[in-house]
Each structure stands twice: as structure tokens, then as C-alpha cells.
Image: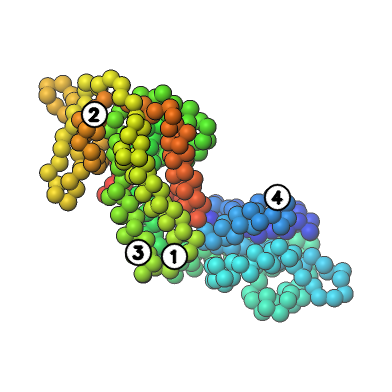
Amino acid sequence: MNIFFSWQSDLNLKNNKNFIEDCIKTAIKEFNAENKHLVEFNLDKDTTGEPGNPEIINIILNKIDNSKLFICDLSIINQDYHGRKTPNPNVIFELGYAIKSLGWERIICIVNQEFGLSEDMPFDIKHRRNLVYNLITKDKKNEKRKIVDAIKSNINILKERGLLHNELDDYFKRDIDTEFITICNHLRKIIFEKKDKNLLIDVNNLLNLPKDELKAKINNKAILGFYLFKHFEVNAKTVKKIIDNIISVSNFKKEKIVTLVKFKDWLDWYNKFNGGRTYEDLYVKLGKVENYKIVTSNNKELPNRIILGKLLPENKMIVDDFGDIGIKPRIDNAVYYHKVNTKYLENYSHLLYNFIEIANEWLDKTGGEFILDTHNHFEIK
């Protein structure tokens, strides 16, 4: 969970940005230590870059959207001006967006009275309850303690009111994240030479993989046919159902729904690309793998579901993977190594990388982390 800090550099950094940021970090450290059962808070803040750059603005607004608490430095920056006193315009802009996105109950406005009083603020701000301090006339240690305690108190109020989590949004996000992780779990078997025992490590490595490196990893790589032949029609239907449910009952932000639609479109694209009809020679067959066995399923609801078993001594077998393969010749060849045909390598790597882009976009819009349903879907060691 993030706390976004909107700061300004017009005033002395030591007594404004650095002091307030230190207070926030201390409050976060103390709150996290006192609430170890909760997901930890982290400090997030403005990015550096050219003022007015649209991409920078979008990044900042997205950070605010995904924050649980917005803290801003509303100190007056023009105290010597005889006209209207004002805080930093960029901070005012970010505050205005935070009011719309998060609401006043998730906002803390901090004012350094060394440069002006709250009464000097614009009308729509000065009547709000601002948190004030003064390092010139008061003891710095006491002022810091006051700010830290106020921030912690605000977080505790949000916790008591159940506002640190949106249970309905988290419910849908958990199901959506399960689908994203399912695809990550599949793609790592195609791309990486070895699977890490900790799925999350491979997920992180996958989502940070550059496009050129991805292409190089799968170029001429011997990959088990089972991993290549699996399709995701069931997953596509699941994501479609989730999108329909979100639209009908949840106040999900439009930007998140757009990303989910991209995910659904990607699943359809993957199924078509990998379906065996558009590119009949997409994969080149290599040698057979002796220690695997295919087991078909009698599940009428999942007629294409098959199990990949790994053979053990004494005629024993463990389940290595499962999935849906709808073409009979592919089922027969699922225990053979294959490689991606070099004439399709560029398109195939682009297909896989597009998923990485969509998954990262989803994380950027939903707090930067997956919610894992480990009990029902995954075992992470």
C-alpha cells in the first residue's frame, strides 16, 4: 500500500520536503511495525522530468490513483508578494486530482507556518483542517513527533473504517490476478531454461524481461510440445465473465477495465495464433522426451483437458502440468521437443512480449502487486 507525497522545491528543502518526507517515513516505519498483519505501507512520490511532459503527468496521476493516502506540502511559496498567497501550483493540481480520486478523508495537507499561515491559503483550502508546523519558533523534535503521530492517526482511522481495502475490488482483483499469474506460470516454462521453486521470482523475472532477451531465449530452444500446444480458451471465457461482472456490480475505474479488455483480446490473439490453422508450421518437431506421459481427461465440461505426467521409478507418476489441447495430432506430439520455426520467431516473441506489457500495465494501475489466492490455485514454496 502506498502513501503519495506531493512536494515542492520552491522553499528550503531541509525544512520542507526533507523534513516532511522524514516524518512520513518515520510514520510508515512505526505503523508497519505495529501492524505486521497488514500489507506494508510504502512511500511514493513525484517523478523527476520535464515539467508539463504528458507522460510524466499520467504517471503521477496513476500513482495517486493507486495510493491509500495523499500527503501534500501546501506551504505558501510567495509570502513576500502583496497579492494573493498561494502554495506551489503543481501541488495544487495534484491535490485537486487527489480530491476527486481519493476524497478528502484520504488527504493530509501540511503547512510550514514559517512562510505563511493557513488563513493565507485560497478560500477552498484554508477552511480545511491543515496540519501545521514551524521549525523556527518551535522545537524540531516535538514538531516531528506531532506530524508523525498525526499521520499514524489518520492511517489508523482509515484502517478502523475499513478504507485501507476495497473488499469488492480486491475480490475481483484476486480473480483477475489469478488469470495473469496462470499465464505467467505457463510462459515461464516456454521462455526459461529452469523454473524457480518460487513462482513469484519467475513472475518478477518474466515481467522485467526485455523484448530482445525474450526473443533470444526462445530462439532455437527445445521446448516440450505440451507447453507450446496449450490454448487458453477457458481462461479467455473466465476473463470475459469477470469483465462482465465488474461492469455490472463494481465501480472499477475505466482505465482498469480497458486493460482487462486488452488482456482478453490478447488471450484471443494467442489462441488464434497458436491454434494450428493460421500457422500450420509454427513449430518444428524435434526428439521425443522419454520420461513424460499424456493422460486424457473424462471431464465433459473440459473436453480438451489433458494431464502431463512425469514418470517415476516403480511405475509411479506425478502430475507435472495440465491444460487444454484441442488438436489430436498435437496431443500425440505433446511429449516431443519442438522449437519455434525461425520464420515466425519475430511474431511469436512479439506475441509473448505483448502479454508482459499488458501485465505490467495492470500492475501499474492496481498497486504494483498481485493478490495471490494461494489456497485455491497456487502452491508457492
- Image coordinates of residue 253 in percent, x first then y, are 47, 64
Q: Which residue is mark 4?
A: 49
Q: Give the CA distance from mark 1 to mark 2.
A: 43 Å
Near mark 1 (Cα within 10 A), the count class, few <14, some 14-19 or many ≥20, is: some
Q: CA distance from mark 2 to mark 4?
A: 53 Å
Say which residue label 3 marks: 244
- In the displayed structure image, the side of residue 171 where residue 367 appears, left or right: right
Which of the pair 372/264 is nearer the observer?
Answer: 264
Amino acid at the residue labelled 3: Asp
- Work out whether mark 3 precedes mark 4 in sequence or the reverse, and give the earlier one: 4
Residue type of the residue flagged with mark 2 = Asn
In percent of the image, x 74 and y 64: which residue is there? Answer: 88
Earlier-in-chain disc, 3 versus 2: 3
Nearer to me, 363 or 170: 363
The mark found on residue 333 in the picture is 2
Marked residue nearer the N-terminal end (3 or 1) = 3
Gap in Å between the C-alphas at discs 3 and 1?
A: 11 Å
Element type at marker 3?
A: helix
